Amino acid sequence: MERLVLLVGLVHVLLVSTMEVNCANILFSGLFGEGSHFLSQVPIARSLAQKGHNITLFISEEFSHRAENPAYAGFHFETFSIPGHPGLIRRTTENTARVAFGKTTSVIQNLELLPDNLFMTKEACRAVLSDTSLMDRLKEIDMIVFDVTWPCGIYMKSYLLRHMNASSIRVAVTSPMSPLQYVHEIAGSPFNPSYQPTLAVGFSASMSFGQRLGNAINWALIHFLGKHYVFDCFSDFKEEFDLDSDLAMSSSFYYKYIDLYLMNIDFAVEFPFPLMPNIIAVGGLTSGPAKPLSEDLEKFMQSSGEDGVVLFSLGTSVSTFASTRSDLMEMFFDAFSRIPQKVIMQLKGPHDYKVPPNVKTLPWIPQNDLLGHSKTRVFMYQGGNNGFQEALYHGVPLVVIPFQSDQPDVAARVVSRGLGVKLNKKLLSADLIHQKLSEVIQNSSYSTTAKRLSAIFRDRPMRPADRAAFWIEHVLKHGGEYMQSPAHELSFIQYHLIDVVLFIIAIIVVIFYLLYRICKCCKSCCFNKSKVAKSKVH
Ligand SMILES: *[C@@H]1O[C@H](CO)[C@@H](O)[C@H](O)[C@H]1NC(C)=O
Ligand SMILES: *[C@@H]1O[C@H](CO)[C@@H](O)[C@H](O)[C@H]1NC(C)=O
Ligand SMILES: *[C@@H]1O[C@H](CO)[C@@H](O)[C@H](O)[C@H]1NC(C)=O
């Protein structure tokens, strides 16, 4: 009898679980296949593949080496090329690294890079929409997950629905960076520049008057640029490819095409702010338990003894500076030769520098695994969001040298939460590097804070990638319309209650006017009466 109950139970579980796995075709478009925008999508794709979904990674042929990489076995790949512009994406990315060491601020750099970036994203999207055989292969797609910096997924959805008889397609957006104002704007979620720092300003949540002024100006600038350039630069595709007429009107119509927003942030370190229900915080996508190191690396780590190891990387694109900036290289090596710690440094490309004996250079480093190693004392790096969360996961304090994009914003979070210190790239010197590194290594408050925030960061019911996968399955089943912000239905005047405020002011004015008239009337009546009374006496 018991066995029968058990068997019935088992059959029930099997049935339910097979019913649950409604295998969907999901396309991931992680900004062409390179860098943090791609890498932070992969764990979500992996989690969905484990649940039985059919995952296709959509990348540029410039990065088609991914398809041969055994780490991505189990995924399908679709590649596109941009006819007439071979190597465009690599060239544009290298530009980003070129200006990184320039004297200009992050806000100005973003503006400088904007035209080239827009040209690249637009040509890439045009190439995708023009490739009818590619579009035909994609017509069975149930869901598109695209990176926020390349909104082509929206135009692909429109194309597939209109021209390829595709049935419903769900769409999710991933954002690998610090909170982006235009994601909030598209999602109709409030963004208040009085306490939410905007992209690249590097402020914390408590701003001085001057900072709030700067933040408000940057907020208006991003609002204007986002509306009129970044998104609407694609609007002529509507004519070119006969897409939905809504698309050409304004980026604020994007919300109709998007079911879900996945933000790579976590409130363990993020300044608190409100979110619409369709924006899910999934910070920490690339972080996780460390895997064992190679024998060679493990030996180097152990050789550091009690002093431990400093990990130094400037990220995928900036690590190429060895060939162009020998002055900086000498500076870093000088500072490293003065500390008792060993140093592991990411350095790309061939070089013939005299490397100090305590330094090991590698073209690629297993960053998360090294951060999880017990000998790692501090992580010095450029301030990328993924690296921030990996260090946070493992409770490693930070020295941040922000260069561009949202890196000053990450640095602001690190400093304001007491996780480490910031180094100004314009003031870099061997002495300063040595001083800041020593401070973070010797003062235990940084590593104590890092351990405390790490415990908060890890204390969540699901892994970030599984949380993202759960929500993707949720909107595949139910759609995301029910979570859409009502703010989109309102005009600017209605949203800010300007009509209501004006109405109330008008009422108050009328009341005061009436009171004034009544008083005046009373006064003149009394005055007249007393006059009359006086004249009677005489
Ligand atoms: C999975 O996706 C690939 C590539 O997009 C497609 O060729 C294949 O038919 C899909 N498999 C299923 C079972 O739908
Ligand atoms: C879409 O459906 C229409 C009508 O059923 C058909 O004529 C057309 O060939 C289909 N197009 C594609 C690309 O399958
Ligand atoms: C250690 O750092 C903290 C936070 O910056 C600071 O408040 C404290 O005074 C420092 N302690 C020493 C001994 O320098």
Image (tube, rainbow, N blue to C red):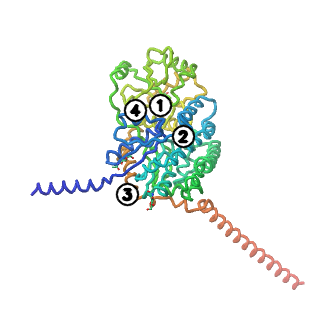
Is disc 2 in contact with disc 4, using a CB cutoff of under 8 Å?
A: no
Mark number, residue 368: 4
Q: Earlier in the sequence, mark 3 or mark 2?
A: 2
Q: Label 3 belongs to which residue?
A: 477
Residue 528: give x, y in percent of width and height. Answer: 83, 80
Find the distance from the CA under tag 4 to the CA under tag 3.
34 Å
Amino acid type assigned to the residue bearing label 1 in the image: Leu
Left or right of 517 in this view: 421: left
Q: Residue 208's quadrant in the figure? A: top right
Residue drawn at (44%, 36%) of the image:
64
Relative height, residue 110 to residue 235 (above, below): above
Q: Nearer the viewer, mark 1 or mark 2?
A: 2
Badge nearest the viewer, 1 or 3: 3
Q: Disc 4 or disc 3, which is closer to the eye?
A: 3
Question: Which of pointers 1 and 3 lies earlier in the amino acid sequence?
Answer: 1
**For the point 32% across and 54% down, which residue is it?**
22
Q: Nearer the viewer, mark 2 or mark 4?
A: 2
Disc 3 and disc 2: Cα gap in Å? 38 Å
First in sequence: mark 2 vs mark 4:
2
How far from the left and from the top, in percent, is residue 454?
A: 40, 38
Name the element at disc 2: loop
- Which residue carries the number 1 mark? 398
Cα–Cα gap, marks 4 and 1: 14 Å
- The earlier-in-sequence mark between 4 and 3 is 4
Residue sitting at the far left: 1
Residue at position x 41%, y 30% in the image: 367
Q: Which residue is mark 2?
A: 83
Q: Earlier in the sequence, mark 1 or mark 2?
A: 2
